[in-house]
């Protein structure tokens, strides 16, 4: 993602492909010629700072939205086991109150340490891989930087999808452990990250660390693709129409909207992924025996279409600030780190 944001200089941070194509329809020939020169002189962020910015942005966002993330997971798995049945008619406020009363306020961050351990490499890889994939795709005939709006959106979708698949594949066991720790209520079968990894391998074999990977890869590709594509497209148009607005505000608003779009599109896959990750957890009997599509069918038959969207409300409450924060933090860190590299 070519998002070299600088606070107070929004006009100088437009993405090369989509922004230039849109600007060509609105600005004079002189402005069109000056835009490439401006971007040419923008310092490029190195690999390590780039990875650092992406990782820290993801960790900050997940920590801020951890309570809503845990509520989403608990709602997603309700009805899967008998001990989850009491949640069928509950509300977000009622379940949040139950957590505080029975487990304490800190329980909202249950599993957050493994969330950060997962999100640091995941966000680093996804942001960095997106930049690399996009640069490679722009070398393909028909997808060049100046290939027009359609080509630019295509590059963003493909680059986002590939980066999401790459990051998810490399960090999946930590994602599975995070889900299982967050889904625990009063009875704690797993005592921490290392114990969870050991217990899963002992009880379910090494393959147990990759339960639900198919649903994850099927969902994360479109999710990241939609998120990055919507974010960059909205951001480019916003900066053209309102070039003096704060880049922080732009990143926060466009990131939030992109999160809503991607969550709505991929939520059923995320729900199936969570449930498959919890198969066999804590010695429980298996519920789904027919793989990814069989699990979809089972949930649809037993819980209806609404069952595939259990937890969508806390997900929206989480994703609006969550995705906005991650993009805003990423842009701010890139600006700071770019400035530090320029000073050197």
Image (cartoon, helix red, strand yellow):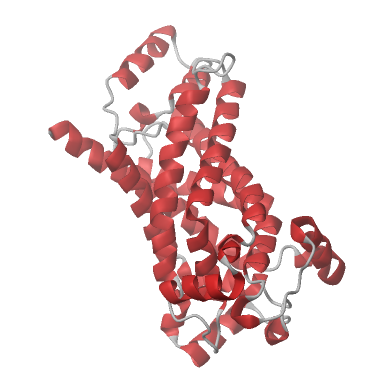
- Residue at the outermost bottom position: 102
Depicted 5 relative to depicted 213: above or below: above
Query: Number of callouts in the render?
Result: 0
* Quadrant where the image shows the C terminus: top left
**Left or right for 337, reference 89:** left
**Quarter location, residue 72:** bottom right
> What is the residue that sits farthest to the left in this orientation?
344
Residue at the image point whose x is 55% and y is 18% from the top:
140
Q: Nearer the viewer, residue 323 or 158?
A: 158
Evaluate whether residue 338 shows in this view.
yes
- Find residue 216 and report its horizontal and vertical position in percent: 62, 54
Work out whether residue 307 or residue 14 is closer to the camera in this orientation and state it: 307
Q: Nearer the viewer, residue 282 or 18?
A: 282
Coordinates of residue 71 in the picture (x, y in percent)? 57, 73
Res. 311 visible in picture:
no
* Residue 185 position in % (x across, y down): 55, 84
Residue 124 in the image: above or below residue 30? below
Q: Residue at x 46, y 68 (%)?
A: 66
């Amino acid at each position: 993602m070519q998002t070299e944001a600088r606070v107070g200089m929004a006009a100088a941070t437009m993405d090369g492909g989509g922004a230039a194509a849109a600007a060509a329809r609105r600005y004079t020939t002189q402005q069109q010629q000056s835009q490439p020169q401006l971007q040419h002189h923008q310092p490029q962020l190195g690999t390590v700072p780039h990875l650092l910015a992406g990782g820290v942005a993801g960790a900050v966002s997940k920590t801020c939205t951890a309570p809503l993330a845990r509520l989403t997971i608990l709602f997603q798995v309700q009805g899967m086991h008998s001990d989850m049945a009491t949640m069928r008619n509950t509300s977000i406020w009622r379940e949040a109150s139950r957590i505080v009363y029975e487990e304490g306020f800190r329980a909202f961050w249950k599993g957050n340490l493994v969330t950060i351990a997962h999100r640091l490499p995941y966000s680093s890889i996804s942001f960095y891989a997106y930049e690399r994939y996009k640069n490679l795709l722009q070398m393909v005939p028909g997808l060049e930087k100046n290939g027009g709006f359609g080509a630019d959106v295509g590059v963003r979708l493909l680059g986002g999808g590939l980066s999401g698949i790459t990051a998810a594949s490399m960090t999946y066991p930590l994602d599975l452990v995070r889900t299982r720790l967050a889904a625990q209520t009063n009875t704690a079968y797993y005592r921490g990250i290392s114990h969870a990894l050991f217990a899963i391998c002992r009880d379910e074999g090494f393959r147990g660390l990759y339960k639900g990977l198919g649903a994850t890869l099927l969902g994360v590709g479109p999710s990241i693709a939609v998120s990055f594509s919507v974010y960059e497209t909205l951001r480019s148009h916003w900066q053209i129409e309102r070039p003096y607005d704060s880049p922080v505000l732009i990143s926060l608003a466009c990131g939030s909207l992109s999160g809503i779009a991607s969550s709505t599109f991929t939520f059923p896959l995320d729900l199936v992924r969570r449930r498959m990750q919890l198969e066999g957890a804590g010695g429980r009997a298996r519920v789904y025996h027919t793989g990814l599509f069989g699990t979809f069918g089972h949930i649809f038959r037993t819980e209806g279409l609404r069952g595939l969207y259990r937890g969508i409300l806390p997900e929206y409450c989480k994703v609006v600030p969550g995705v906005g924060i991650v993009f805003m933090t990423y842009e701010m860190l890139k600006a700071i780190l770019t400035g530090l590299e320029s000073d050197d």
